[in-house]
Amino acid sequence: MQHEKPVNPLPPVVMALALIFVVVEGILSLGEAGLIGGPSAVGWRLGALQDYAFAPAVWDQVAERGNMSFDMLKRFVTYLFVHGSFTQVVFALVILLALGKFVGDLWNPISLLIVFFGAAIFGAAIYGITARGNVPLFGAYPALYGLIGAYTYLMWLHLKSVGENSWRAFTLISFLLGLQLVWGLLFDAAPHWVADVAGFVFGLAVSPLLGPGGWAAFVARMRERG
């Protein structure tokens, strides 16, 4: 007799991403607390932001000056794994584990990684093009918003299949963007929401091709609509 597990395990790719976040933040937080690294460890977070965060100046170097050095290109991805505080990474982990579980159970790992890192790169590029000044971009949220885009697409399919209002699928993103708007107005926060929205758009746009059934299912749905 086979016994079902009371809790389905997280997809391995989601666990691997979460582990990277935990390890990086653990090192930075322990350094800030003076538990490892000695006195110089207090500045590890600032150093990590300087070495791995993205900024509009990075986009200028790549797009306008043609600087394709590893130090420039890596920042389109490495900024995801450096956060400004322990609290920020905790919220990121909660979203990653929840949405990664939901999407990862239905998608293959390669598709999930394409959405995750594709949203990060696209979000950084749009931020680099539109942001004023040189405020750095850091944290996992543009990639997580890519997963929210994938989640929205899956919810849209589900609601449509059961005959309910498919626009309800956009409830989560509307709520989160509303929170960001209020936060930005109250605390004059950095315009990172631009990268987040771009990540969401990327995730939503590629989901019909990468989601369950892939291209064949997408073509079939288009024929049904036609």
Image (tube, rainbow, N blue to C red):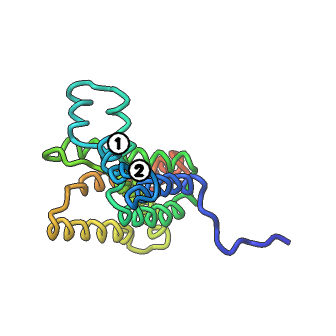
Q: Is residue 219 above or below residue 175?
A: above
Q: Residue at x 39, y 43 (%)?
A: 78
142 left or right of 5 in image: left
User: Which residue position holds label 1?
Assistant: 52
Label 2 neighbour load within 10 Å: few <14, some 14-19, many 20+: many
Which quadrant holds residue 63? top left
Task: Work out whether residue 98 or residue 169 is closer to the camera in this orientation and state it.
Answer: 98
Q: Residue at x 32, y 26 (%)?
A: 68
Q: Nearer the viewer, residue 107 or 37?
A: 37
Residue 199 at least partly seen: no
Q: How many marks?
A: 2
Do the residues bearing badges 1 and 2 touch, measured as CB atoms within 8 Å? yes
Disc 1 residue type (three-letter): Tyr
Name the spot of residue 155 as percent of width and height, x first. Answer: 45, 66
Q: Which residue is mark 2?
A: 81
- Tell me if I can see residue 30 in this picture: yes
